[in-house]
Amino acid sequence: MIKNKKVLLICKESFSFPLFFIAQKLIAAGNEVGAFFIHHEESYYNKSRYNENTYFKFKEELKEVKLYGLEDLCSEFNKQYKSPLVDMDYLEEVERNFTHFKNLNLQLTTSQLVTRHFHTRFFFTNSSFKQNLKFLELGYKNVIKIVDDFKPDLILDTEDGELLRTILNEVAYKNKTPYILLTILDLKVINYQHIV
């Protein structure tokens, strides 16, 4: 069991549901817990049927958990949506420091939001290369800010899709912070150990 650590949980949509219960157990074991909701629709918008059992469940029922979302990223991206001003110097710095696992082009392919032409979902519109670079830039700024603020001893996640997870994995590697991907089998073991 993890004890007396700072644990950052990575949450997205229904995949965050088991993490709610893990957060309760971590808090009971004396850990400080943060939850980073990496999907914009969960923290940026008001409470709805979409986010009431994810972001707002944490917010209303686990007040001990420090919540992180994408409000700043979304607001900034929306301001520059039509004509983004990309900070290429910053992205060059990112490329030097945060491409241990994947180069920036491969990192971009991990998100449906910036590879819409490869996904047939009707609600995604195409984005320009500049918009994609802006999203990458803001993603790094947001993730680094959260990691610097919370300073996790370890990161727990239940999935590996989406650009912000890829960014977080690169930042965690650079900071020598363990990033642990829990599988369903791992969750059963955690529950079994708790019962025994």
Image (cartoon, rainbow, N blue to C red):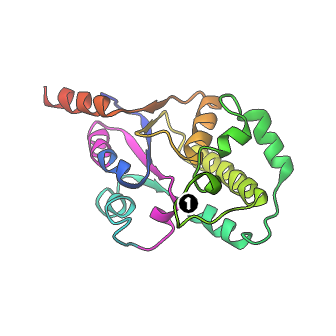
Q: Residue at x 61, y 48 (%)?
A: 143
- Residue extent of the magenta highlight: 20-46
Q: Residue at x 67, y 48 (%)?
A: 140
Of helix, strand and loop, which one carries label 1? loop
How far across and down, in percent of the image, does residue 152 sit?
50, 38
Q: Residue at x 79, y 34 (%)?
A: 96
Q: Residue at x 75, y 34 (%)?
A: 97
How far across and down, in percent of the image, does residue 136 sit?
69, 51
Residue at the disc numbered 1? 70
Outermost residue to the front: 120
Nearest the eye: 180 or 131: 131
Quarter of the image for residue 23 reads top left
92 is higher (above) or lower (below) than 79: above
87 is higher (above) or lower (below) than 186: below
69 is higher (above) or lower (below) than 157: below
Quarter of the image for residue 79 reads bottom right
Quadrant position of the C terminus in the picture = top left
How far across and down, in percent of the image, does residue 6 sit?
44, 38
Quadrant position of the N terminus in the picture = top left
Q: Amino acid at mark 1?
A: Leu
Outermost residue to the right: 89
Count of numbered labels shown in the rendering: 1
The reply to whether the magenta stretch includes residue 115 is no
The reply to whether the magenta stretch includes residue 28 is yes
How far across and down, in percent of the image, does residue 2 sit?
34, 29
Few, some or many residues within 10 Å of mark 1 (<14, 14–19, 20+): many
Seen in the image, is 2 located left or right of residue 113? Answer: left
